[in-house]
Amino acid sequence: MFAMQHRLNTRQRNSVLKLRVATNCPDWNIRLGIIKACTEEIIADHEHGGGRSHWVILEELGIRIGLKRSVIQEARPLVSTQLCWLAWEALMSNRHWLEGMVANTCAERSNIPGYGKGIFRKHGWFGLERHRWGKLFGLSDDELEFFELHEEADIEHSNFGWNTIAEYAERLGVVDQVVQACHFNLYVWEQYLNGIAAAGDALDRGQQPSFA
Ligand SMILES: [Fe+2]
Ligand SMILES: [Fe+2]
């Protein structure tokens, strides 16, 4: 469920939602920085992904754990995923571009080292997942590259977001707004991931999850 939904989510966020933030950003270099990060996610990542986009690498992970490529490609968004896209649309389209910048990068922040405890602190959230998926599915480090690449790519992506906010939020008078935006965006991420977990549990019980 994660492979199927997150593949769709990455495509939606990086081909639609984050580009709205780029559109709203008046600074040329920052706008290009946003688009560059999006191209790594949806077109080609030459720095960390051997020229493949992140959703393609995720598709390969899905196949390694036993999913059929056609099943992954035909997957529809869950209702919960669709609702999160609508929530993000509100948080990323008609907002100050710095609030959008928070929306673009706040979840990538949890993928980098330095927060929480244990493996999470050492390698970030995806580092923890790499470890758990490796154990659960018996996959090698190479086979878990989707997670590993994010430990690196997301340091860049999230630093770009964080540094931009540090530089501009005070000057533009939106300090409290960006903090509030971060809270809301993280709530949406929580809903999104809980939706995936609930749908996975439904499948385990032999029930059909609700698709949009
Ligand atoms: Fe990515
Ligand atoms: Fe990223």
Image (tube, rainbow, N blue to C red):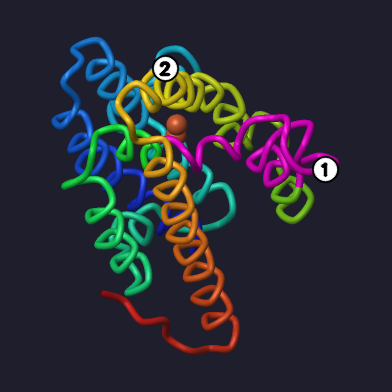
From the top left corner, tell me how far across and down residue 74 is, in percent.
28, 61
Question: Could you say which quadrant of the image residue 140 lies in?
Answer: top right
Residue type highlighted by circle 1: Lys
In the rendered view, does 182 fall on the left or right side of 93? right
| Residue 2 in view of the camera | yes
User: At 33% from the left edge and 52% from the top edge, which residue is drawn?
Assistant: 8
**190 and 27: which one is in front?**
27
- Marks 1 and 2, Cα distance to the nearest angstrom? 29 Å
Magenta portion: prevailing SS class: helix
Report whether the residue tagged 1 is closer than 8 Å to ligand 2. Answer: no
Q: Is residue 48 magenta?
A: no
Number of numbered discs visible in the structure rendering = 2
Tell me, for residue 167, which label it has, or none. Answer: 2
Tell me the element at label 1: loop
Q: Is residue 108 magenta?
A: yes
User: At 50% from the left edge and 49% from the top edge, which residue is drawn?
Assistant: 63
From the top left corner, tell me how far across and down residue 187 is, in percent.
48, 60
Q: Residues within 10 Å of mark 1 (few under 14, many from 20)?
A: few
Residue type highlighted by circle 2: Glu
Residue pointed to by mark 1? 117
Q: Which residues are magenta?
A: 105-131
| Residue 49 in view of the camera | no
Q: Residues within 10 Å of mark 2 (few under 14, many from 20)?
A: few
Marks 1, 2: nearer the viewer: 2
User: At 48% from the left edge and 53% from the top edge, which residue is drawn?
Assistant: 183
